[in-house]
Image: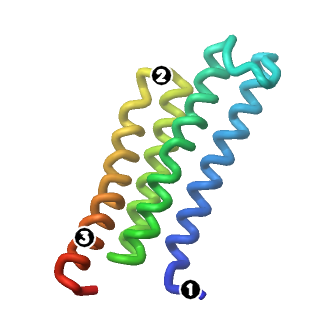
Amino acid sequence: MMMEHRWTAVVSLLALLAYFWMGLNVGRARGKTGIAAPAMTGDPILERAVRVQSNTLEWLPIFLVSLWLFAIYWSELVAAAVGVVWIVGRLVYATGYMADPGKRSTGFLIQLAAVAVLLFGALGKIVWSLATGGT
């Protein structure tokens, strides 16, 4: 079992719960605007909710793979902490974007910085271990 990666697992599930919440927001926006599926346009509220959910989905594979590789090759607790920062960034992005698309930058930059730490940290450690034959 992977009991040593419990914090990484919790953060992964929290990220998926945030994504689930964003999906529910799309449903709420549909109800509020009266725009039924499969339509994706027609009201800025719906279009923003769809874009927030879609953009998060675009980032989830990069985040989750980097999170787990960082946890395995560097530090589980650091990975989990940076993962929480990523989630906070996505939530800031979502609330900012829903209020005004011009207010999405802060959240985007927070999550970008977090995923860069995870991605390049994991990549660097793996390349280093391959180059040096170390662990």
Upstream in sequence: badge 1 or badge 3: 1
Q: Position of residue 61 (x, y in %)?
A: 51, 53
**Labels 3 & 2 near each other (Cβ < 8 A):** no
Q: Position of residue 125 (x, y in %)?
A: 26, 72
Q: Amino acid at mark 3?
A: Val
On residue 20, the disc is none
Badge 1: how crowded within 10 Å, few (<14), some, or many (20+)?
A: few
Q: Amino acid at mark 1?
A: Met
Q: Is residue 132 above or below residue 48?
A: below
Looking at the picture, tell me which residue is in the foreground, 126 or 63: 126
Q: Secondary structure at mark 2?
A: helix
Q: Which residue is mark 3?
A: 127
Foreground tag (3 vs 2): 3
Quadrant of the rendered structure where residue 45 is? top right
Q: Which residue is mark 2?
A: 101
Q: Which residue is mark 1?
A: 3
Q: Amino acid at mark 2?
A: Pro
Badge 2: how crowded within 10 Å, few (<14), some, or many (20+)?
A: some
Q: Residue at x 64, y 40 (%)?
A: 22
